[in-house]
């Protein structure tokens, strides 16, 4: 029997699962109540996909992204990246795994104020195992296409908000990670700059077959994703694309 390829699910097209999240739960204890920020989230992401996550403020998007990137630990559930359960790793294993495979753009770009732009960009190169890989060529390409080549020796406080965002993106991409988590990477950019930064992320993604998972409130950007998930009160549902 033959199936129309346009209706085939990624799995049926032979694509590989890069991220497999099962029944993920994250709760925060407040003084008199428990907040369930991520409520039993299950999702699969295929290699090379661009996934957008949208949802109201406080719905749990950043908390979910931090769990997936191994920056925070869930109360229950598992997160398999390239077949390895990152929730079962000890801090050293997780740190090395993140350095090798994961890139993260934070909602508040989290640059270290005492470090120059260049020093901030190079932080992940100190964490990885792939020390045989040189980053110079990638650095040159990234700072050129991000338009920050002449800002590298400035401190974050000497850069505009948009430039700080670009430094944070260069830092996330410097190790050529297999999977990039980006939390509102275009949040404080105007339309033209937001589109430009997304084009750059998609260009890098295309070059190295990267998987991109992005939180955004910008529907123009979300609509360019392969699939859109919506977060509501800690629950994640697919709102555009195939299961
Ligand atoms: N460290 C924490 N301690 C206690 N509560 C937290 C913590 N981090 C997040 N929360 C709570 O978890 C819920 C989800 O927060 P989160 O930051 O994930 O939302 P968000 O969807 O990213 O929102 P926004 O769009 O405003 O960035 C909120 O109710 C928030 O107050
Ligand atoms: Mg957030």
Image: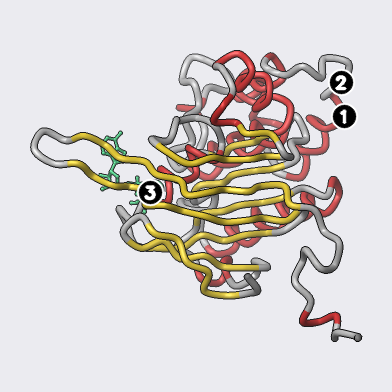
Q: Is mark 3 within 8 Å of ligand 1?
A: yes
Ligand 1 position by quadrant = top left
Mark seen at residue 134: 2
Left or right: where 67 falls relative to 128? left
In this rendered view, identify the residue nearer to me: 243 or 67: 243
In this rendered view, identify the residue nearer to me: 5 or 108: 5
Question: Which numbered disc flags the more N-terminal residue, 3 or 2?
Answer: 3
Left or right: where 87 falls relative to 93? left
Q: Which residue is drawn at 50% across and 44% down?
A: 65
Using the rendered view, name the quadrant where residue 150 is placed.
top right
* Residue highlighted by disc 3: 38
Instruction: Give the structural element (helix, strand or loop) at label 2.
Output: loop
Q: Disc 1, disc 3: CB below 8 Å?
A: no
* Place of residue 102 in the rendered image (x, y in percent of width and height, measured from the top left): 66, 34
Tell me the mark number nearer the camera, choosing from 3 and 2. Answer: 3
* Residue highlighted by disc 1: 137
Tell me the mark number nearer the camera, choosing from 2 and 1. Answer: 2
């Amino acid at each position: 029997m033959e199936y129309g390829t346009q209706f085939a699910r990624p799995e049926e097209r032979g694509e590989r699962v890069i991220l497999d999240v099962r029944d993920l739960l994250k709760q925060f204890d407040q003084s008199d109540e428990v907040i369930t920020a991520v409520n039993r989230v299950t999702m699969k992401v295929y290699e090379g996909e661009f996934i957008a996550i949208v949802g109201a403020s406080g719905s749990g998007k950043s908390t979910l992204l931090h769990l997936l990137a191994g920056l925070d630990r869930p109360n229950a559930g598992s997160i398999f990246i390239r077949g390895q359960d990152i929730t079962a790793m000890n801090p050293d294993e997780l740190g090395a795994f993140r350095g090798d495979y994961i890139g993260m753009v934070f909602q508040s770009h989290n640059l270290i104020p005492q470090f120059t732009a260049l020093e901030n960009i190079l932080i992940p190169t100190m964490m990885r195992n792939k020390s045989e890989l040189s980053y110079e060529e990638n650095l040159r390409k990234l700072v050129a296409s991000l338009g920050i080549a002449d800002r590298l020796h400035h401190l974050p406080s000497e850069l505009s908000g948009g430039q700080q965002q670009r430094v944070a993106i260069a830092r996330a991409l410097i190790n050529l990670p297999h999977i990039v988590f980006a939390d509102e990477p275009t949040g404080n950019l105007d339309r033209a700059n937001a589109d430009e930064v997304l084009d750059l992320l998609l260009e890098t993604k295309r070059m190295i077959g990267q998987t991109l998972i992005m939180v955004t409130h910008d529907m123009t950007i979300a609509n360019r994703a392969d699939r859109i998930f919506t977060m509501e009160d800690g629950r994640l549902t697919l709102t555009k694309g195939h299961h």
